[in-house]
Image (tube, rainbow, N blue to C red):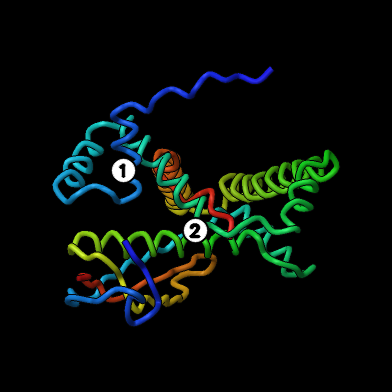
Amino acid sequence: MTDNTPPPEPSEDELLAMAYADGELNEEARREAAHRMASDEAFALRVAHYQRLDVTARSALQEPQDIAHAKLAAEPTQRAALGLGWAALSVGLVGFYAWIFYVMVRDPEMPTTLKVLMLTGIGGFLLLFLAVLRKRLRELPFDPYTKVQR
Amino acid sequence: MIVTTCDTVPGQEIESAIGICRGSAIRARHVGKDILAGLKNIVGGEMHEYSKLLAETREQALDRMTEDARAQGADAVVAVRYASTAISQGAAEFLAYGTAVKLK
């Protein structure tokens, strides 16, 4: 049975977000909306959502090979091969480098200062990596370009 | 906002040129996609990972250029061009630029 219920009317905020994303606001309204986005995260997310729809809509249409590509990506064998491959590569590389560092740190001939410097460097790198990763994860919902295919 | 690679807007008259408007973007994909693209290098075929990277960067640069034109009070951008270069390995940079104009 078909549901004939009309979709709910968009709220004022949704209309404003759509107009902002489509570039339909005048300069003053645009500045106000931009100012609001800085303090209202929910509104900023709404704008990002409509920007994403706009960017995706103007992207290239689906090509025949996209269907084959999507089918192959969904196949259990392909998914298992990719999953196992990534797991094996990650465990192997992390284990390998962890082992090297362990051997170096346990080496009695290596000066303590060098060991401390090496561990400090690794710690610094990890901290920087985590900071960059955290920033990217926080930015991701506001990035309207992630759905663009080609 | 009309955005065109033509020097004029067909069917409309340009009142005045405001100036250059531009937008650039640099994006990268994560290391996992770089590894898969590297493997694609061995077997051949389209590198979807990098096609997507270029497309994302192109659209972002274009949007920034349009935004710049809008901020200058333009009605259209004519003579739009793209320029691309590589800042670092595995990253794509696009520069979109054109002339912001006022229409009659």
Chain at numbered mark 2: B
Residue under pointer 2: B56
Q: Among all residues in the image, which is located at the extreme bottom? A: B7
Left-right relation of B65 to A140: left
Amino acid type indicated by mark 1: Ala
Q: Nearer the viewer, residue B96 or A92?
A: B96
> Which of the chains bears the disc numbered 1?
A
**Along the line of sight, which residue is nearer the eye, A59 or B60?**
A59
Q: Is disc 1 in contact with disc 2, using a CB cutoff of under 8 Å?
A: no
Q: Residue furthest right?
A: A77
Reading the image, the residue beneath label 1 is: A19
Q: Residue B3: x, y in percent?
A: 36, 68
Visible residue check, residue B40: yes
Seen at 56% across and 46% down, the residue is A105
Mark 2 crowdedness (10 Å alpha carbons): few <14, some 14-19, many ≥20: many
Q: Amino acid at mark 2?
A: Glu
